[in-house]
Image (cartoon, rainbow, N blue to C red):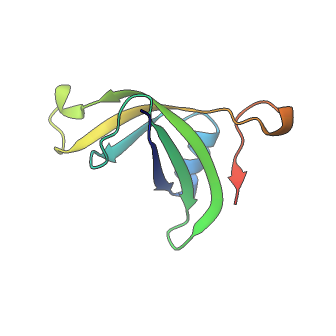
């Protein structure tokens, strides 16, 4: 069964994700990420949450140690924006909470 993992992200990286330019996450593998899980990415400016969030789906998980000598315990998650369509509108949206 898919899980939703809440993660925080700095504004400059958050914008790259929203714009579709950044399609991966390098994360400590302390949550048992699985393909098909979701990431609720919450924008965090270093002091507080801004209230902006997007939903991402984990499509693929790469253990970086399989291809290079990296810091143990981290994974590379291939992610994509999940389109959320309020009231029949299309495309991914950024939530303002």
- Foreground: 37 or 90? 37
Question: Residue visible at 62% across and 52% down?
Answer: 53
Question: Residue visible at 42% across and 32% down?
Answer: 1
**Residue 65 percent across, percent down from the top left:** 18, 33
Question: Residue visible at 16% across and 44% down?
Answer: 72
**Residue 40 percent across, percent down from the top left:** 53, 47
- Foreground: 59 or 64? 59
Relative horizontal placement of residue 97, taking residue 58 as reference (left or right): right
Relative horizontal placement of residue 50, taking residue 38 as reference (left or right): right
Question: Residue visible at 33% across and 35% down?
Answer: 76
Quadrant for the C terminus, please: bottom right
Q: Quadrant of residue 69?
A: top left
Query: Which residue is the extreme one toward the front?
Result: 1
- Foreground: 51 or 31? 31
| Picture layout, residue 39 above or below residue 36 | below
**Residue 58 percent across, percent down from the top left:** 45, 32
Query: Which residue is the extreme one toward the bottom?
Result: 47
| Picture layout, residue 8 above or below residue 63 | below
Relative horizontal placement of residue 61, taking residue 90 as reference (left or right): left
């Amino acid at each position: 069964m898919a899980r939703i993992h809440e993660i925080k992200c700095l504004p400059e990286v958050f914008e790259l994700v929203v714009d579709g330019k950044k399609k991966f996450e390098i994360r400590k593998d302390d949550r048992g990420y699985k393909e098909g899980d979701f990431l609720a990415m919450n924008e965090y400016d270093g002091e507080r949450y801004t209230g902006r969030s997007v939903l991402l789906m984990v499509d693929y998980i790469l253990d970086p140690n399989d291809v290079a000598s990296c810091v143990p315990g981290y994974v590379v998650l291939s992610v994509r924006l999940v389109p959320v369509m309020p009231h029949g509108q299309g495309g991914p949206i950024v939530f303002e909470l």
